[in-house]
Image: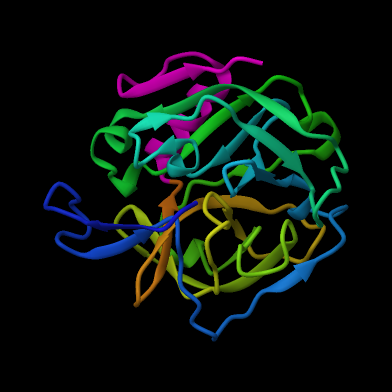
Amino acid sequence: MKQLLILLALTFSFQAFAEIEIGDKELFGQYLREQITDTSKAPYSFVGKLNTSCTATMIGPKHFITAGHCVYDVYGRQLTNYLVFTPRQIENGTYPFGQIKAKKIFIQKEFMDRLDVAYDFAVVELAAPIGTKTGWAELQVVTNESSLKKIRITGYPQDEILDTMWSVTCPATIKGTEIRYKCDTSSGMSGSSLFSAKAPGAQETIYGIHSWGSSETNAGVIINQKNFDTINAWKNGVNFPANTVTKDLAN
């Protein structure tokens, strides 16, 4: 995603009048990324790249989760008309499980109307159930910092070799609807899941979605009970919250 500098107003209750960067993140140099070349183990097996230069994670047979600004053009103020997911990509020009077109987008009105980063996540339904081959991650409601400990972020940073997957682990804290951390990230990792940091191959759950950065911290949207319920409603196709916006995509 292109860098977007936003002067947040008081409508952004968690960070009034603070300048942040949606779609670009910070390199702090304290927790460094490592390249992933084996995607056979979780959580790397669930991760893929979007044609919008973002990262996404499978959360069901036909659904993935990503950042809202990865499917919504914050300049043109409209949802994308074409979206493709490439699971387990580790180098340019290789598509281990093909490229799957998106069928439907689920997002919240608050992000579209005022770019409120507390709502910067989206779920997308794919045209084919690729999750039956890649597997998928489960969501975890985060209630306090003691349950958070460390996080793992895996994605496709644009400051590295094109279409290569990288991962980083670091401590994290909670502030309101955000998870904050100083893992090294950059453009292209937008939409990456904030995984519980366990040994590769162990069952890892999603704590949040990587969204923005500033000179002081990187941050993502937390999976609290409200967001957990919203995401599952979208996945299950029932009881959508009133603020839900959907868009069917041509295939």
Q: Residue at x 49, y 13 (%)?
A: 238
Q: Is residue 115 left or right of residue 13?
A: right
Which residues make up the magenta segment?
Answer: 224-251
When asked about the image quadrant of residue 135, the answer is top right
Residue that lies at the very extreme toward the left in this rendered image: 10
Up the image or down, 86 lies above or below 160; here it is above
Q: Is residue 213 left or right of residue 113?
A: right
Q: Which part of the image, by quadrant, shows the C terminus?
A: top right
- In the image, 71 versus 120, the foreground residue is 71
Residue that lies at the very extreme toward the bottom in this rendered image: 30
When asked about the image quadrant of residue 224, the answer is top left
- In the image, 144 versus 155, the foreground residue is 155
Residue 248 lies in the magenta stretch: yes
- In the image, 80 versus 219, the foreground residue is 80
Q: Is residue 11 left or right of residue 230?
A: left
Q: Residue at x 20, y 65 (%)?
A: 18
Residue 231 image position (x, y, % from top left): 49, 31
Q: How many marks?
A: 0
Q: Residue at x 21, y 60 (%)?
A: 15
Up the image or down, 61 lies above or below 17; here it is above
Residue 13 image position (x, y, % from top left): 18, 52
Residue 37 lies in the magenta stretch: no
Residue 41 image position (x, y, % from top left): 84, 55
